[in-house]
Image: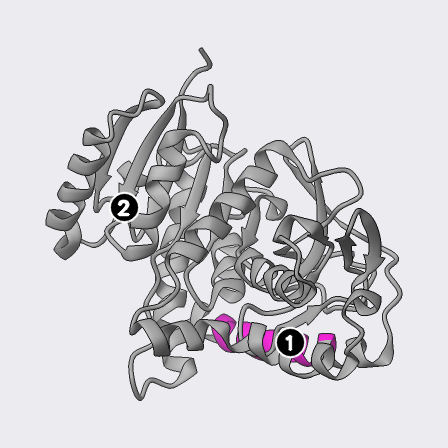
């Protein structure tokens, strides 16, 4: 049996974590023969709730789960980590300006980045889920200068999965018959779900998504807005934000980091934009198509970009530049 790995989940008393922890502890993410020490971090008022989560994890009687450590202390939470899943963030409250939200989250992710820098392994893989995810991820990375920028990523896999599912439903196939959709940019309503390079397997033959769907108006209209607005639609219907689907996307994202992407396929994740070939400003965390091998991601280069895509990619980049500049002002205060 391998040595246990230490996996941190922040916001661990929240509803995304509640959907996520069982899958991690069961072996769905890091492998069926990989023992896990789960570290659960939350704020002091949530510790009683966390105790209930710990009891439930114990009661699942999962053979891979060696230890569960609930804590509100960063020096405990971030110690010797192999993986950190940063779910907890300040949610947007009614009447809150986006810049107020950014300011609150800069404080949180500056602290967590500094804790990663001080206590975690330098090889730690960090996934930021808490919104605004791209900019929170950038702040965490900048606050952890001794950990490679490439070790940080943010979650756009939920958007990727949403886009794949919309295409699959439209074509009447299961979602595993759709590959290479792309989410460009920010995990916000400016993101650009792009199917110009996607393929759909229909009755055993692989076809370009545009040819399989044969409805350009839908692909350039309702499809994009449905994916962009899906989170809001879930909140409106459920009165709570996406949790089950977010947890599934986190599992997909981390599993691909650990085990790599399939040959000839790419997935979407928010990564450091330095050295990209798509003309995106470099000092951003931006969602690109990536391939992963040996726990190392690489942006999939050389895809032709038409004028329609270019405009959408630039618009979401512009939003990220503005977010970054606002956040950096707060960071320097």
69 on left or right of 169: left
Give coordinates of residue 180: x percent, y percent: 74, 55
First along the sequence among labels 2 and 1: 2
Asked whether residue 215 appears in the rendered view, the answer is: yes
The residue wearing badge 1 is: 223
* Vertical placement of residue 326 versus 283, above or below: below
Q: Which mark is residue 286?
A: none
User: In this view of the protein, which residue sits in the foreground, 182 or 245?
Assistant: 245
Where is the C terminus found, in terms of image quarters?
bottom left
Callout 1 secondary element = helix
Give coordinates of residue 263: x percent, y percent: 77, 38
Q: How many neighbours does mark 2 have within 10 angstroms: few (below 14), some (14-19), or many (20 or more)?
A: many
Residue 322 covered by magenta stretch:
yes
Q: How many neighbours does mark 1 have within 10 angstroms: few (below 14), some (14-19), or many (20 or more)?
A: some
Q: Main secondary structure of the magenta part?
A: helix
Residue 71 covered by magenta stretch:
no
265 on left or right of 295: right
* Vertical placement of residue 52 versus 131, above or below: above
Residue with the most extreme top position: 1
* Vertical placement of residue 66 versus 227, above or below: above
Q: Which residues are magenta?
A: 313-328
The residue wearing badge 2 is: 41
User: In this view of the protein, which residue sits in the foreground, 67 or 217?
Assistant: 217
Which quadrant would residue 154 be assigned to in this image? bottom right
249 on left or right of 160: left
Residue depicted at x 86% and y 60%: 303
Asked whether residue 119 appears in the rendered view, the answer is: no
Q: Nearer the viewer, mark 2 or mark 1?
A: 1
Residue with the most extreme left position: 48
């Amino acid at each position: 049996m391998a040595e246990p790995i230490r996996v941190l989940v922040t916001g661990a008393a929240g509803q995304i974590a509640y959907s996520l922890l069982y899958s991690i502890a069961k072996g769905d993410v890091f492998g069926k023969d990989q023992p896990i020490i789960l570290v659960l971090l939350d704020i002091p008022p949530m510790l009683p709730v966390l105790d209930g989560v710990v009891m439930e994890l114990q009661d699942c009687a999962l053979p891979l789960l060696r230890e569960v450590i609930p804590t509100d202390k960063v020096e405990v939470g971030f110690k010797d980590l192999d993986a950190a899943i940063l779910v907890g963030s300040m949610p947007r409250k009614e009447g809150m300006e986006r810049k107020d939200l950014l300011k609150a989250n800069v404080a949180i992710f500056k602290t967590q980045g500094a804790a990663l820098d001080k206590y975690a392994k330098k090889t730690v893989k960090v996934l930021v889920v808490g919104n605004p995810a791209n900019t929170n991820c950038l702040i965490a990375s900048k606050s952890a200068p001794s950990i490679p920028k490439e070790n940080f990523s943010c979650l756009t896999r939920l958007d990727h999965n949403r886009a794949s599912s919309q295409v699959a439903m439209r074509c009447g196939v299961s979602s595993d018959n759709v590959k290479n959709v792309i989410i460009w940019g920010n995990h916000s309503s400016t993101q650009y779900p792009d199917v110009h390079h996607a393929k759909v397997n229909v009755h055993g033959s692989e076809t370009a998504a545009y040819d399989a769907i044969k409805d350009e108006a839908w692909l350039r209209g309702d499809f994009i807005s449905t994916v962009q607005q899906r989170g809001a639609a879930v909140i409106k219907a459920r009165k709570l934000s996406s949790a089950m689907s977010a947890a599934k996307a986190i599992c997909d994202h981390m599993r691909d980091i650990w085990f790599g992407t399939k040959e000839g396929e790419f997935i979407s994740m928010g990564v450091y934009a330095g050295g990209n070939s798509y003309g995106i400003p470099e000092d951003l965390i931006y969602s690109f198509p990536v391939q992963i091998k040996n726990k190392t991601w690489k942006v999939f280069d050389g895809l032709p970009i038409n004028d329609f895509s270019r405009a959408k990619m630039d618009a979401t980049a512009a939003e990220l530049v503005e977010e970054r500049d606002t956040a950096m002002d707060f960071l320097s205060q």
